Amino acid sequence: MNIKNVNFAQKKAKDFNILTRLYQYYALYILFLPVFGSLFYNFKVKRNKNLENKPYIFAANHISYMDVFIVNYAANRPLAYIAKQELFKTDTWAQRWVTRNILRLGGFAVNREKVGLSTIKSVKEVFKAKYNLCIFPQGGIRKNKIVENINGGFIYFAKTNKIDIVPVAIDGLETYNWKPFKKQTVNIQTGTPISYKLDEKEIISQWCKQISDLTGYENKNI
């Protein structure tokens, strides 16, 4: 795949297919969980079993570079990922390798300062393909155990596509563990869906409260 001239924000429904799902399965269940789950971490997942059989936006707090795999594990559904455009680089072999794998996992780019038309169209294609969307409303990684400074972009995607939001709460990865067999517990929980019909302030309030209640983090959005 020659990716030097690719628009990383642009995806079509056909890009979210069985091969994408198989690659996600391979990355999660063949690579990530057997290695990290066997040696370093005890991943405890508690899923909301009452979720309907329809697409959702899975909106998670962001505390580590492992969160993409963790949300995939929690959702247990085909996912597409919105990733900051800074992750898509092609200057070196290593950067191209990372970019290719983000694309294979169903990732596409967003300019966090100003969401472009390509990203908006790609989100529509995600739901057209009957995939779910993973997004991190906090933007970057936050390890301070505080819920605050939420980016409302995920609400725009919810409202324009008429898709409800499922909070995903992650705690226990504020620090990494590299001591084999001394497992660090990571708790992952999916919350109660938040209706896209609510106003923006209420959606943010409900998301922050659920993340705070499920993780024990301080909620500064009150």
Image: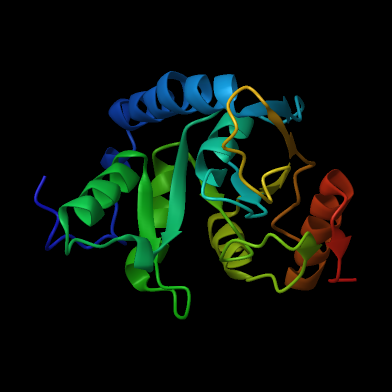
Residue 12 visible to the viewer: no
51 lies left or right of 20: right
Quarter of the figure with residue 50: top right
Residue 147 visible to the viewer: yes
Q: Residue furthest bottom?
A: 113
Residue 172: image x %, image y %?
73, 42
Please, is residue 189 above or below residue 95 in the view?
A: above
Quadrant where the N terminus is found in the figure: top left
Quarter of the figure with residue 5: bottom left
Task: Between residue 16 and residue 41, name the one nearer to us.
Answer: 41
Q: Determine the residue positioned at 75% across, 24% down.
A: 49
Residue 60: image x %, image y %?
65, 50
Quadrant where the C terminus is found in the figure: bottom right
Q: Determine the residue positioned at 69% across, 51% down.
A: 174
Q: Residue furthest left?
A: 2
Task: Between residue 140 and residue 195, name the one nearer to us.
Answer: 140
90 lies left or right of 180: left
Q: Determine the residue positioned at 40% across, 30% down.
A: 24
Q: Determine the residue positioned at 56% across, 65% down.
A: 140
Residue 32: image x %, image y %?
47, 28
Please, which colouring scheme is shown?
rainbow
Marks counted in the figure total 0
Task: Between residue 32 and residue 206, name the one nearer to us.
Answer: 32
Please, is residue 185 above or below residue 168 in the view?
A: above
Residue 43: image x %, image y %?
67, 28
Please, is residue 160 above or below residue 26 in the view?
A: below
Q: Residue furthest front?
A: 179
